[in-house]
Amino acid sequence: MSPSSLWSPETSSAEIRPADTAPAASALAEAQTLRLNTRHLRAGSTGPLAEAARWGVLPLPVGRFSLHEIHPKRDLPLLHAWMNDPEVARWWELTGDEEVVRRYLAGQAASSHSSAYLGCLDDEPVGYWELYRADLDELARHYPARPHDVGIHLLIGPAARRGRGIGAVLLRAVTELVLRAAPDTMRVVAEPDVRNQASVRAFGRAGFRHLGELELPDKTAALMMRPRTPREAGGRP
């Protein structure tokens, strides 16, 4: 949904309006063979978020889903085409030649708290993902951040894949994977532009609560939050 840049954590007084939406039933079956053993995840400020490409393949109703590391030479033409699609460009603001996207990806690669991935269904690239430590991000200045909050940015690239509910299915699954892999994370947050109602609805269908609006430097955002449920309290798979 749209990108954030990095600052140090700090809270401010955001208007919070509680909602009644609760996380729905799990998208993951207990039998899923995903590589989420936290003992083998790389340490560091990003922690398990940096290992999402090693989580394996997840069978979902919409296809076999997996996350893959971004390889600029291989993936730049595809991501450039997605970012110049008017439906995507309106929210991500990365239009232009390939150099614009290349510089953006280089910034993501250099980040100490954010990891970028290509999301695939049945081995076909369908989306661009960023998993990031929201408490270490600029966003933390604008909402009551807690240690180890994780944020998600997502875009569905192919136009034919949009408007079919795929985003909500993938958001629910990835959120649950994050909570399994990162036992210290109690909440996953998102901040889509309030005008991007398709995005706001997708997060809502994925179990995120709409808690209010945030005035960010580049937009008015909907603060969406998915808390860890009592069933997930153990965190580890």
Image: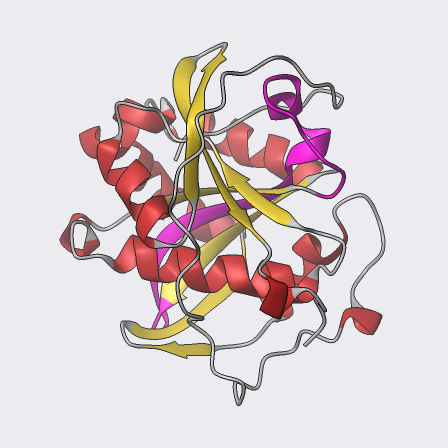
Q: Residue at x 33, y 22 (%)?
A: 96
> Where does the magenta region start and end?
121-148
| 47 or 214, nearer to the observer | 214
Q: Nearer the viewer, residue 109 or 175?
A: 175
110, above or below 203, in the image:
above
Q: Which residue ends up furthest to the bottom in the rendered image? A: 31
Color scheme of the displayed model: secondary structure
Task: State left or right for residue 179 relative to residue 170.
Answer: right
Q: How many marks?
A: 0
Task: Write the residue at 74% across / 76% down.
Answer: 37
Q: Quadrant of residue 109?
A: top right
Q: Is residue 121 visible?
A: yes
Q: Where 204 sits versus 122, above or below?
A: above
Of the pair 173 and 19, the residue shown nearer to us:
19
Can you say which quadrant of the picture contains the N terminus?
Answer: top left
Residue 57 lies, with reference to residue 70, above or below; the image says below
Q: Which residue is drawn at 70% across and 66% down?
A: 235
Residue 162 x %, y %: 19, 50
Question: Is 108 left, or right, of 190 in this rendering?
Answer: right
Q: Does the magenta stretch include residue 138?
A: yes
- x and y, in percent, of residue 132 in the image: 62, 41
Q: Position of residue 138 (x, y in %)?
A: 64, 21
